[in-house]
Image (tube, helix red, strand yellow):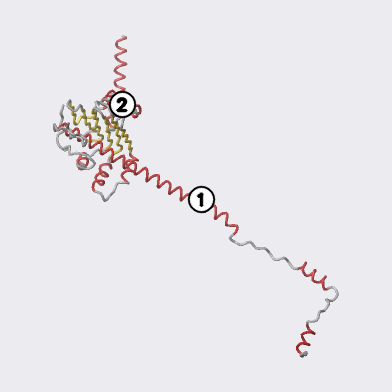
Amino acid sequence: MKTFTLKAIVALLLLASLPCERALAADGRLLLPDFSALEDKASEVVDVNLNTALLGLAARFLDDKSPDEVAVKQLVAGLTGIYVKSFAFDGDFAYPKADIEVVRKQLSVPGWQKLVEVRSRKEQTHVDVYLSLDGDKVNGLAILASEPRQFTIVNIVGSVDLRKLHQLEGRFGVPDLRLEGKPPTVK
Amino acid sequence: MNTPLDDELRKALRPVDPDEGFAERVMRRIDSTPAPLQRRPRWFPALPVALAASALLGTILIYAWHAEREQQRQGLEARRQLIEALHITGEKLDLAYRGVNGETRPPAPDDTGA
């Protein structure tokens, strides 16, 4: 009887947690941990928090005469948020990997699909690129990159048009990823 | 040598005492004459209103200018963050791309290769 009750409670908890996980994946937004403790240790910190309103404001200040900035404007038009946390350190692996794992765990729920996974033992880098899918529509992009002296989390929320991202090739340092083809995977 | 004209003038301008009751009549006349009304200039009562309106308009203009400047500052900062976010996104996608293609990291500018 006691075992049955425990099983029922566990089952109920699992059921209750499902909608939350689905909700996290559904809007393409990640819940980023509080990295404020790392700011003192890091030699360089980049913290970008652009919600819909700020993205709209930023788009107003992009130059319509510059083709690069017009391309950015078009890319940003379908987005509801861009969040970047990047920390650089003077020493190797001065950051807690557990914080990255917390984020990585959020990306293991249904809705997120791993597009690229790169692990380089030589360079000690680990880069994962995920897409949040709502049906066949992309509504989020996440990049987790850990290097010996740097770790970065990028979360782009909203209708990410991969073709527009592709058009940014060579601009703002965005490379040609051949995103229109089959996603490559290297382990 | 006096001319007839001189005589005429002297006669006309000779001092003459006022007749009886002249002073009383003058005083009575002064008392009965109404004092002229002291009119304020028309614009004067409107001056405080005009000053208040000017101050209000000035405050509104300064506020609007400040708000516009603040929005511009926020907009430029958001733009800077957007470009920086795209830079970092590009950098990390490039890292993934090089990993996928088996390319190694390009040497840093200060890397002598030693």
Q: Quadrant of the N terminus of chain A?
A: top left
Q: Quadrant of residue B46?
A: bottom right
Closer to us: A146 or B105: B105
Q: Name the residue furthest top.
A: A1
Image position of B4 (left or right of A177)? right
The nearer-to-camera label among 1 and 2 is 1
Image position of A40 (left or right of A182)? right
Within 10 Å of disc 2 (Cα), the crowding (few <14, some 14-19, many 20+) is few
Q: Is residue B54 above or below residue A19?
A: below
Q: Residue at x 75, y 68 (%)?
A: B33
Q: What mark, if any, has residue A20 been given in the picture? A: 2
Q: Is residue A88 above or below residue B31?
A: above
Q: Position of residue A33 (x, y in %)?
A: 32, 27
Give a yes or no on whether discs 1 and 2 share a subunit.
no
Image position of A125 (left or right of B11)? left
Q: Secondary structure at mark 2?
A: helix
Q: Residue at x 60, y 57 (%)?
A: B45
Q: Residue at x 32, y 9 (%)?
A: A2
Q: Position of residue B63 (x, y in %)?
A: 45, 47
Q: Which residue is mark 1?
A: B56
Q: Secondary structure at mark 1?
A: helix
Q: Quadrant of the C terminus of chain A?
A: top left
For mark 1, name the chain: B
Kind of residue at disc 2: Cys
Within 10 Å of disc 1 (Cα), the crowding (few <14, some 14-19, many 20+) is few
